[in-house]
Amino acid sequence: MAACRRIKSMGKDEFRAFFNSFDVVLSDCDGVLWREMEVVHRSPETVEKLKEMGKKFYYITNNDCKTRADLINKCKSLTYDATEEDMLCSSYLAAIYLKQKNFAQKAYVVGGPAIVKELEAQGIKSVGVGPDVMEGDEVDTLLRFKPDPEVGAVIVGFDKHFSYPKLMKAATYLHEPHVLFIGTHPDVERPSPNRNRFPGPGCLLRAIEAVAGRQATILGKPGPFVGELIKKKYNVDPARTLMIGDNLNTDILLGKRFGYTTLLVMSGVTTDADLQRLQKDPKNSIVPNFYADRLSDVLDCLKAYS
């Protein structure tokens, strides 16, 4: 069975060894710090304590529905202290990825306004955002569409207006091999504020990949682009870095790929049953090093062992 230690099962010396093993914290947001507009219990207090004790704290989220500025405002409203320099989100990643490639065409965006705003901030034009409903039947839709010759990239994120016309248009652009194919992130599910399932943009991305016959370049977790950016931007030492997240396939996998210590919290998409199944598979490579019911378990241990 793969090893995965529960934070609250540690003794004083073991917990202190864990806590002293990292200087930098890379934390997911949705499912760790909040669920939509609901703060995860005592997480703000925990983040503040980590900073007080000298830990550098960065917010690394796959959220593409908000800009970095939007997320800073959300942090403030939920009593987290953050700056834009501390924040990486996948709408921003899409913009700087294209900027680094000296992209001078238009992007067709299957996503929301935040992606457009981040693109505009980098001087990149885009089309496609907003409702695109089917008028007539699917054949009429196909015959009416005239591709924009200036489109040189397709970006796929969360799109509440996702539709058959958008699927067709994205796939049509991607039929041209020179058109870049970008996925903001692969999450198929978002942390839900209730018991209903909350599909994420990874579902939309898979549909477009299927009809386009191409795989997207993933910019958010667990893709290499965000990992390399963290390395360059924050100059982290992987051996002294803790990655915290609620998603095994994005947060924890990113940590494993880049050599970070990993802490899974159970306040988001991962369930106890998921973790138990994972630990019974000795070949599974995404077993976290540690897990906790919520981030505040770290705070409880700090108080208990002070």
Image (tube, rainbow, N blue to C red):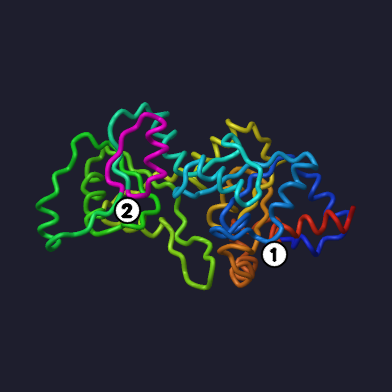
Is 158 displayed left or right of 145 in the figure?
A: right
The residue under label 2 is which amino acid type? Glu
Residue 154 percent location from the top left of the image:
31, 43
Residue 205 percent location from the top left of the image:
36, 54
What residue is drawn where x is 24% and y is 54%? 132
Quarter of the rendering containing residue 39: bottom right
In this picture, which residue range is highlighted in magenta?
A: 110-129
Is 241 displayed left or right of 253 in the figure?
A: right
Residue topped by disc 1: 293
* Residue at mark 2 to residue at mark 1: CA–CA distance: 35 Å
Task: Reply above or below: 105 against 217.
Answer: above
Q: Residue 209's mark?
A: 2
Residue 161 percent location from the top left of the image:
31, 57
Residue 227 percent location from the top left of the image:
55, 40
- Numbered disc 1: secondary structure: loop
Discs 2/1, front: 1
